[in-house]
Amino acid sequence: MKKLTTMAMAVTTALMLSVSLAGCGSSDAPAASAGGNTTPTAPSDSVQTEQGEASGSTQAAEGASDNGALQASASDLDYIRNKGTLVVGITDFEPMDYKDEDGTWIGFDADMARAFAESLGVSAEFVEIDWDNKVLELDGKTIDCVWNGMTLTPEVTGSMECSRAYCNNAQVIVARSDQAENFQEKSDLSQYNFAVEAGSAGEQQAISLELPHTPVKAQSDALMEVAAGTSDAAIIDSLMAAAMVGEGTGYADLTYTIGLNDEEYGVGFRKGSDLAASLNDFFTASYQDGSMLEIAEKYGVQAALVEQ
């Protein structure tokens, strides 16, 4: 009797093990039949449901995360109001953005940026950037706008959300005064080497005119190249040339000669940013109440203002 009981328990255990193994098998694991053939075992409905629910939960979580990111980035205006600052990307560019004796950023663009930030209930913070990386700085949110006498080129308007034009400008040749006669005609320029700011409208003019040129970090560096004699001339913005070269300036031995084009300045934000429309409204209001003209006269750029 003891032997029969033991045998029955063994059979029962084997049957339970067989059922257990069959229940744990995946769709990829073949189950053995009495005839020796193998037939794929489909996953149970409960497994499929659990996998479907897990997959759906993951997709829902990812969708919620994506929607949250979109909502968070939908309004640049809300973004800068929440953090309390408008971070302005600039270079050293008199009379638009430059430092006074106390190290404070001043200039037509700097003063206008402060006034705009104040109108939004935030403060302006200025960050000096590598001009050639301005779009990367914007998209990476290390700055919120580029406000630095920026020419509205197709490249700029294609990669940023830009304001309306607020100032007229041109690219001009700056040379040493004793050599100015050599830079009076476009057709005579190809024999000289020009210093230009990398990524600037001046560099674009040098490229379009097929002029030998050396890119430098800033327009102020281009002037230093000419003053030092390491470049024959520079191509810079006319507003900067008027403020920084000639009698009574730090570059009294330099002068500007011919203009190469006509262009306009605008302010750039991240593509799709609603701050551009807000700035356009601010430009209109400040032009009409006279505050834009007052700031322009302070820095001698009133003749370049574009009517708003």
Image (cartoon, grey):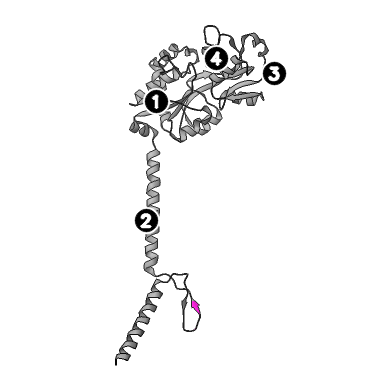
Q: What residue did someone put label 3 on?
A: 187
Upstream in sequence: badge 4 or badge 1? 1
Question: What is the residue that sits farthest to the bottom in this orientation?
Answer: 1
Q: What residue did someone put label 2 on?
A: 57
Q: Is residue 78 above or below residue 149?
A: below
Upstream in sequence: badge 3 or badge 2? 2
Query: For the residue marked with disc 3, what is the amino acid?
Result: Ser
Distance from disc 4 to disc 2, alpha carbons, whole Å, reads 62 Å
Query: For the residue marked with disc 1, what is the amino acid?
Result: Glu
Q: Is residue 136 above or below residue 33?
A: above
Query: For the residue marked with disc 2, what is the amino acid?
Result: Ser
Secondary structure mostly taken by the magenta-highlighted segment of the chain: loop
Residue 144: image quadrant is top left
Q: Residues within 10 Å of mark 4 (few under 14, many from 20)?
A: many
- State yes or no: discs 4 and 2 in contact (Cβ < 8 Å): no
Q: What range of the chain is rendered magenta?
A: 34-38
Upstream in sequence: badge 4 or badge 3? 3
The one of 70 and 173 positioned closer to us in this rendering: 173
Distance from disc 1 to disc 3, alpha carbons, whole Å, reads 44 Å
Quadrant showing the N terminus: bottom left
Distance from disc 4 to disc 1, alpha carbons, whole Å, reads 26 Å
Upstream in sequence: badge 1 or badge 3? 1
- State yes or no: discs 3 and 2 in contact (Cβ < 8 Å): no
Q: Nearer the viewer, mark 4 or mark 3?
A: 4
Residue 271 seen in the figure: no
Look at 45% across and 13% down and name the residue there. 299
Q: What residue did someone put label 1 on?
A: 125
Q: Position of residue 115 (x, y in %)?
A: 37, 21
- State yes or no: discs 4 and 3 in contact (Cβ < 8 Å): no
Q: What residue did someone put label 4 on?
A: 241
Q: Nearer the viewer, mark 4 or mark 1?
A: 1
